């Protein structure tokens, strides 16, 4: 299967999630799908997709056999659904784990377990590990991969950047100018304290 671009991953992940968590509103209208892609919670990164971009992603997913458009009797407006589970023969545990990785980026086993609760309840961490290992061992193409620092990432969009699996790697570091300013400020404070102590000592001489 050809790698999906980030918009395709987000659209497909949103369809997977909403099918399980809000089945009463699934399949989704285009407007509901745009909102699902852009929601602020349970998403990393948070995006602001326009309707046109979501439509383009849907067209690509339909061409790849990963999404379907539903219209006609019983549907006043066109709605959209995914076909990932059927195409790849995935069960509910695999769909839930894959969905979290698609919507939240690389995750640890514990994070996957905690963030799939509404979609599938893994009893033990070992169950999550077994699920991820089975997805990584799939042939002809694995669907997930183990990353540094105990994290896992999906492979639907190609091999993820290992740097994205390490939160520490994204933490900003002080620029050299800021560091020098802090040192100078501390030196001034020390000098002022010395002067104050000297003045205080002279009062008793």
Image (cartoon, rainbow, N blue to C red):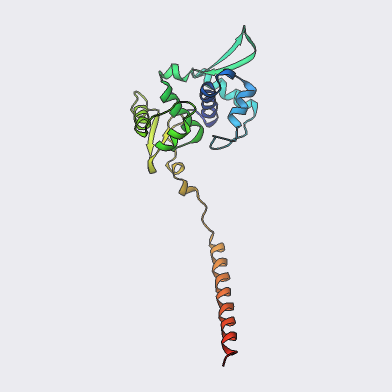
Position of the N terminus by quadrant: top left
Q: Which residue in the rendered view is the most extreme toward the front?
A: 204
Identity of the residue drawn at 41% across and 37% down: 110
Count of numbered circles on the image: 0
Q: Which residue in the rendered view is the most extreme toward the bottom?
A: 205
**Viewer-proximal residue, 110 or 15?**
110
Tell me where residue 125 appears, x and y as whole percent.
37, 34
Q: Is residue 149 above or below residue 36?
A: below
Q: Is residue 57 visible?
A: yes
Task: Determine whether, in the image, residue 95 is placed left or right of residue 175.
Answer: left
Task: Determine whether, in the image, residue 8 is placed left or right of residue 95.
Answer: right
Task: Determine whether, in the image, residue 22 is placed left or right of residue 138.
Answer: right
Q: Is residue 141 above or below residue 86?
A: below
Identity of the residue drawn at 62% across and 23% down: 32
Tell me where residue 191 appears, x and y as whole percent.
56, 78
Q: Which residue in the rendered view is the most extreme toward the top?
A: 73
Location of residue 201 by image quarter: bottom right
Location of residue 140 by image quarter: top left
Tell me where residue 123 appears, x and y as whole percent.
38, 29
Tell me where residue 10 appears, x and y as whole percent.
54, 29
Q: Is residue 108 visible?
A: no
Position of the C terminus by quadrant: bottom right
Q: Is residue 82 above or below residue 45?
A: above
**Viewer-proximal residue, 156 or 32?**
32
Identity of the residue drawn at 49% across and 19% down: 66
Task: Determine whether, in the image, residue 2 is placed left or right of residue 198.
Answer: left
């Amino acid at each position: 299967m050809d790698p999906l671009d980030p918009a395709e991953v987000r659209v497909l992940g949103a369809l997977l999630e909403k099918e399980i968590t809000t089945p009463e509103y699934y399949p989704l209208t285009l407007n509901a799908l745009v909102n699902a892609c852009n929601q602020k919670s349970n998403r990393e990164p948070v995006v602001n997709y326009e309707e046109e971009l979501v439509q383009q992603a849907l067209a690509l997913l339909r061409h790849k056999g990963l999404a379907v458009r539903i219209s006609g009797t019983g549907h006043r407006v066109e709605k959209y659904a995914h076909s990932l589970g059927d195409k790849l023969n995935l069960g509910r545990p695999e769909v839930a784990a894959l969905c979290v990785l698609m919507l939240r980026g690389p995750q640890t086993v514990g994070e996957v377990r905690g963030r799939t609760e509404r979609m599938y309840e893994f009893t033990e961490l070992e169950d999550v590990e077994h699920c991820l290992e089975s997805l990584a061992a799939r042939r002809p193409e694995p669907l997930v991969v183990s990353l540094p620092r105990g994290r896992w990432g999906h492979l639907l969009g190609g091999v993820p950047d290992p740097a994205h699996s390490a939160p520490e790697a994204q933490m900003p570091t002080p620029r050299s100018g800021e560091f020098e300013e802090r040192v100078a400020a501390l030196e001034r404070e020390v000098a002022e304290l010395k002067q104050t102590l000297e003045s205080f000592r002279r009062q008793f001489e």
